[in-house]
Amino acid sequence: MNTPSAQIGFDRFIQLDWATAALRVRAGMSNLDDLVRMLDSSHAGPAAKKKTRTVINRLWLEPRPDLVEFADRGVRIYSESPDTPVSALTWGMALATYPFFGKVAEIIGRLTTLQGDCTSAEVHRRMSEIYGEREGTRRMTNMVLQSQADWGAIERLDRGRRIARRKATDLHGAPVVAWLAEACLRSTGRALPVANIESNPIIYPFNLGGSTSYILSKSKALEMRVDSAGNQVIGLAS
């Protein structure tokens, strides 16, 4: 399910304000000049701004061809329900676009499930086991951690050495729930048990709320079925 282009790294810190501006541009609610001014004021040089803009483009302004329709549905959710947390929408696009982002999220979600916190060293070690002991792996992991902190998912304590979960955002069964579940499927590349969607570590910053099974069954983009073990699973509709 993940295409080669999906391997492009999440290698820049992305403020939620920048992602919000980009989402509003795609929704026709704002002008691109507003985003340009924000980036101009926060970046020291054109090279840094260009790299940041590349990540923002992938998230909202110029998503991969296979994600255009998915992004458009996210924009429609935001347009029809402006109170939808932009953090949930941008999290979903980051999961679908960047497997690296999803893996960091999964690791944090798992490590913080019991006690609510973990060390950044643990996250770096596990990412290195997956992607190799490279400076790029460490740098990109730091960019994801910094971004997730800015998006309200985690708090970095002890000069960044410890990571603590913030209180999860309750989505109250809103339309974004099925869309976010779809992002999980796009990120993992496989069908997932319906019973475990709510507690999936990859979306640890959010409580889906409502009757998750019912909400997912109403999505035309998703397909519910029973696996060989008799468990109800959800996958992308063919």
Image (cartoon, rainbow, N blue to C red):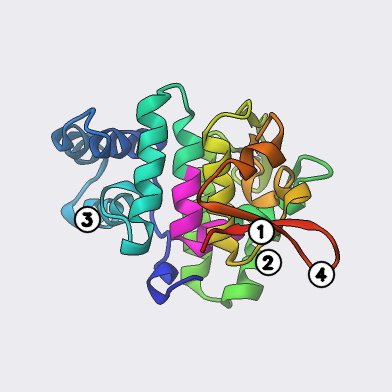
Identify residue for label 3: 50
Q: Earlier in the sequence, mark 3 or mark 1?
A: 3
Q: Is residue 131 above or below residue 210?
A: below
Residue 78 horizontal/vertical position (percent): 39, 31
- In the rendered structure, which amino acid carries the disc numbered 2? Arg
213 with respect to 181 (left or right): right
- Residue span colored magenta: 91-103
Callout 2 touching callout 1 (CB < 8 Å): yes
Q: Is residue 23 left or right of residue 104?
A: left
**Which residue, given by chain and number where applicable, does mark 2 sit on?**
126
Q: Earlier in the sequence, mark 3 or mark 4?
A: 3
Q: Main secondary structure of the magenta part?
A: helix
Please say if 104 is above or below 21: below
Give the mark toward the camera: 3 or 4. 4
- x and y, in percent, of residue 180 in the image: 55, 44
| Inter-mark Cα distance, 2 to 3 | 30 Å
Q: Residue at x 26, y 48 (%)?
A: 61
Let me know if residue 227 is in the magenta part: no
Residue wearing tag 1:
123
Marker disc for residue 228: 4
Which residue sits furthest top?
A: 83
